[in-house]
Image: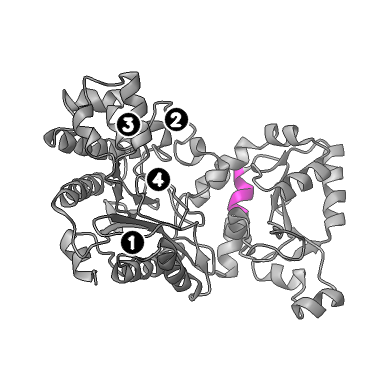
Amino acid sequence: MFSIETYTKRQHELIKKINSGIILLPGNEESPMNYTDNPYRFRQDSTFLYYFGIIRPGLFSLLDTSNGDVIMYGDDYTVEDFVWMGKQPAIHDQAMLCGVKKTGSINDLANRVKRAIKSKEPIHFLPQYRHHNIMKMMSLTGLNAQEIESHVSTELIQAVVSQRNYKTEEELVEIEKGIDTTVDMHVTAIKMLQPGMCELDVVVEIEKIARATGGDISFPTIATINGQILHNHYHGNIAKEGQLFLLDCGAETPMGYAGDLSSTFPVSNTFSSLQKDIYSLVLKSHYACVDTLKPGVTFKEVHRAACLTIANGLKNMGLMKGDTESAVEAGAHALFFPCGTGHMMGLDIHDMENLGEEYVGYDGQPKSTQFGLKSLRLGRALEPGFVVTIEPGIYFIPELTDQWRADGKFKEFLNYDAIETFKNFGGIRNEEDYLITTDGKRLLGNKKKPMLIEEVEALRP
C-alpha cells in the first residue's frame, strides 16, 4: 500500500468533486470457477484500490459529501473462517491503513442507504462490471438491473477519471516495476523460442516470471504465430521455421499496477527479407507516433501519424495506391491496421475502460464510428501525467481481405492482387509505454525492450 496520506488525500479530493449526496464504491467479491469454495485469483476493483488500497473481498465504502465522512463496510471473518484461512485482520484495522476510521457491517450499510433514499439524498455509483456488485446495488437501492445501469452517476465517473488519469510519482514507480518485469518476460520469450516449440511452452515460462514477483499477469497473454488475430488467446499451435511470433503480455505488480508490451520476432534465427520490410515499416510508424507525443497534441493526431506512415509505406510496396491522405481519411488503411495506436494504462491495462472510453479517452466527446478508428480507445488531448501505450501494427487478415475484395471496397486505394500474396504473412506490432511530461514524453521502464531488428536477432538462439 501507499501511505495513509496518499489515500486520505484521494478520498477527500473525490468528496470535493461531488456536489451532494453519498458515494458508493464497492470492492469485488470472490469469483468462483466452478463452485463457491474454488474461486479464481482474487482481483480487487481498481477504483477501490485507488482510494483504499485494501486487497480483501466483501468490502464496501461510502463517502458522505455532507460531512466528509468516509466509512468502510464489511463483515469480519469468524473463527470458522480462520480454520481454513488462518487468522485474518479485522476490517477496522485494515481500514486504518488507508486513513478510514469509521467502519460498519453490511447491514449497517443497508440502513445508511435506506436513510439516504428516504431523505432523497443523491446516491452516486459507477458502472458495475461484475454480477455480484450489480446484485448488491440492486439490494441496497431497490433498483432493478436495467435501472442500475441507467442510474450510474456521470458526475462520479468524471470525478474519478479526473483523478486517476494523472499518475503520481509513486504510481509511476509501481508502473515501472510492472514494465521492467514485462521486459524480462519478452526477453525470455525471444531467447527461448525454437522451431517445433508449442506456443504454450512460451506462455508457461513467461507467466512464471510475472507471478514470481508476487503479482500476476496484467491480462491474458497473447503469444501466437497468428499475429493477424489481434487478441489471440489460443496457445496450441506449433511454431515453424519461417513464421513470425507475436507476443503481447504484461505483468501486474502486487499493488495492481500494470505493464503492457508487445514484440514480434522470427521463429527462425533471423527475419526474412520480406519480414524485415514489414517490420521496419511498423517500427517507422511506431517512432512517428513517439515523435508526436507531447502535451496538447490529441492522441487522434498520434494515431494519424501511424496511419499515414503505414499507408505511405504500403503504397511504396505496391499494396496501396492513390492519394495517401485521402486513403487514410476514407479508412482504406484499416484493412492492414484495424485497431488503435494505444490506450491509457495504470491500475487497469486499459485504464478505467469500465467507466467508459468516451470519458476516459475522449473527455466526454463521441467516438468515431468508422471501421478501425472506432477501435481507437484514446483520442483526447494529451496532458502531463498521462501514461499511454504506443503499439501501431500491420496485420494481413485473410477473412477481412476476402470480404473487402468481394464487396469491391476501396478499389481506388487497395491493390488486391498484390495483397493476395501476403494473406499468409501474419501480423506485426511492437509496443512501448510512455509518460507524457510537461515538455514531451518519457519512455517508461528501467529496462529496455529489444525493438530494432539487430537487437531482436542478437537474442535469438
Residue 70 visible at all = no
The residue positioned 59% from the left and 53% from the top of the image is 47
Spatial distance from mark 4 to mark 3, Cα to Cα?
A: 15 Å
Mark 1 crowd level (few <14, some 14–19, many ≥20, 10 Å Cα)? many
Badge 1 amino acid: Leu
**Circle 4/circle 3 CB separation < 8 Å:** no
The residue at the point 25 percent across, 64 percent down is: 450
Question: Which mark sits nearer the N-terminus, 2 or 1?
Answer: 2
| Label 1 residue SS | loop
Camera-near label (4 vs 3) is 3
Q: Circle 1 is placed at which residue position?
A: 444
Report if the CB atoms under discs 4 and 2 are less than 8 Å apart.
no
Q: Give the number of the disc on residue 230.
A: 4
Label 2 belongs to which residue? Answer: 367
Separation (CA) of disc 3 from disc 2: 25 Å
Disc 2 + disc 1, Cβ < 8 Å: no
Labels 4 and 3: the sequence-earlier one: 4
The residues colored magenta run 12-17
Q: Pick whichever of labels 1 and 4 is earlier in the sequence.
A: 4
Task: Tell me the quarter of the picture where residue 455 sits.
Answer: bottom left
Q: Residue at x 32, y 54 (%)?
A: 431
Is tag 3's residue or tag 1's residue first in the polypeptide sequence?
Answer: 3
| Quadrant of res 271 | bottom left
Q: Nearer the viewer, residue 185 or 169?
A: 185
CA separation, marks 1 and 4? 24 Å
